[in-house]
Image: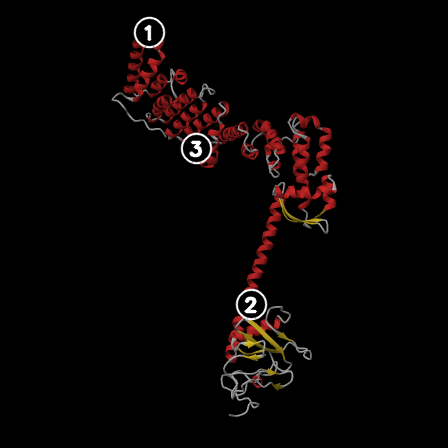
Amino acid sequence: MTTVVPTSEEDPALAVVRFTSELAWADAGPEAAEEQVNRLCLEAQESMVMGRWMDLASLMLTSADLMFSKVSDKDLECIFTVICNLVTKPESLDEVHEMTKLISGKIIQQPNDKPAMRLKILFNLYNLLENPYSRFFVYMKALNLAVNGKVTEHIIPSFKKIDSFLKEWNIDIKDKRALFLGIANVLKESRSSSKDSFKFLTKYLATFSGEDAHTMDEAKEEAVRTIIEFVKSPDMFQCDLLDMPAIGQLENDAKYASVYQLLKIFLTQRLDGYLEFQAGNSALLKSYGLVHEDCIAKMRLMSLVDLGSNESGQIPYGLIKDTLQINNDEVEKWVVKARTAKLMDCKMDQMNQVVIVRRCTERIFGQHQWQTLRTKLSTWRANVANVISTIQATNKITEDGSHSQAVQGTPSATRAAAAAASSSSTSTSSGCINNNNNNNNNNGSMIQEQQQGNYCMEENNNYNLELLSIMPVDRSSSRMLGNTAGYVTDKSKNQNLASFNCPGHIAYTHESCLPPQNSNKPPSRHCGSDYYRDPTCPRR
């Protein structure tokens, strides 16, 4: 916002009156010019003393057109900053609004003469205003100036804040309609993305909900325009226009019923429906600037989306070929186009000649689509609840099992490791698994290898799977490494293999300590942490 900084003792408003008066009467001669300048300055002083700010603004704007043609942009901006600053003087909001209308009307009179500067002056005026409705009024004038002066690029960035502007202005339905339509016209003139213009056109049409027939007639032309923009757009494939009363009134309209039918084909039917319509309405399509080849391309994509919406999630290549009326070698090309446009999330199974669809865009999102979404969310919620229940049940079983094992003196980690090894007997990890061909059950023993984090198992048909030792294993010599144990027991042969140094005591749970399967018989007294003497070892 521009700030007025006094550079002399004379009031800025009076200085502007003097400057503009001298400029206006410059060709009348010195004497006549001086007389007129003095008269206008006295009149301006009287208005300032009496507080007639409206009269002062009118006096200052008398030579507005002359200033735009003869004054530099810098001086012009300074002059109008002083003029616009007058809106801060009155106490009455009505007077402020009248002054706003007067000043903005003068600014937009010649839109083709310095339109960018005129638009900047309007923005300065907007920022000086405190009345929300006066701000809205100036903004609408800026929209018209941008379109007529072809400087739309200066006002388009403000459209991103339009929602906050609406909250500030608090305008009624009629003003909202004028605003949305004005923005749509600006976007159309600037040749911006068709989606942006279409967005504000739909906002405009949405304001006609629940209106009487006479009021609805006002929206017919814009309803037709919205339909044509949707059909023309190469990157719009979804809309809710069919649910709008302003669009629905066209269905039985004698002049625009065919346009409504065209929209319905694009949103609910496939390519064959469009081709049938085009055969009888080719002149209509041309009159609205629709290109037949572009319509076919769009309808092929929308037909492919419709195929992907079926429950099976698979589309045979042959069905795509017939529906889109293309050759066999073009099927994958159109699938790629649909993926590129983000209409489908799918993959092509060339071996089976089908397209597997994971997700596709709905052309319309009405009551049926909302119901489908609700069903899917309910199913997902139930599945998540089942997963949570399963996890909680598993945790409870684990906690109960740990408590039971702690009572029996067996570490829970031991049984967990044993269960893991038992359930993964077909594992292909780097641990060694020695299967006994004569054993038909899943019992056995496990040695945990600390060095590599793997498990070695050997089958035994006499005992449950239990942890024999946590001593590391030397695979090359098939013996347990350590200071206290120097051999392993080959239970399949029921004999002990001599090792390099037979110790007097063995530091692992002896097989006699392992209870039979499904037995609750307590272990012998010598089992547990005590050292048990192996009878096969000679006494020292």
Q: Evaluate whether residue 94 shows in this view.
A: yes
Instruction: Report the label total.
Output: 3
Q: Which tag is nearer the camera, tag 3 or tag 2?
A: 2
User: Of the residues shown, which amino acid type is indicated by label 3?
Assistant: Trp
Badge 1 element: loop
Residue with the most extreme left position: 9
**How far apart are labels 3 and 2 at the CA level?**
59 Å
Q: Of 465 and 94, which appears nearest the observer?
A: 465
List the residue tagged with mark 1.
29
| In the rendered image, the vertical position of residue 297 relative to residue 85, given as above or below | below
Give percent across and percent down for residue 283: 69, 25
List the residue tagged with mark 2.
394
Q: Which tag is nearer the camera, tag 2 or tag 1?
A: 1
Q: Evaluate whether residue 210 shows in this view.
A: no
Q: Of 323 and 398, which appears nearest the observer?
A: 323
Q: Residues within 10 Å of mark 1 (few under 14, many from 20)?
A: few
Q: Residues within 10 Å of mark 2 (few under 14, many from 20)?
A: few
Badge 2 element: helix
Q: Earlier in the sequence, mark 1 or mark 3?
A: 1
List the residue tagged with mark 3.
169
State the colouring used for the structure image: secondary structure
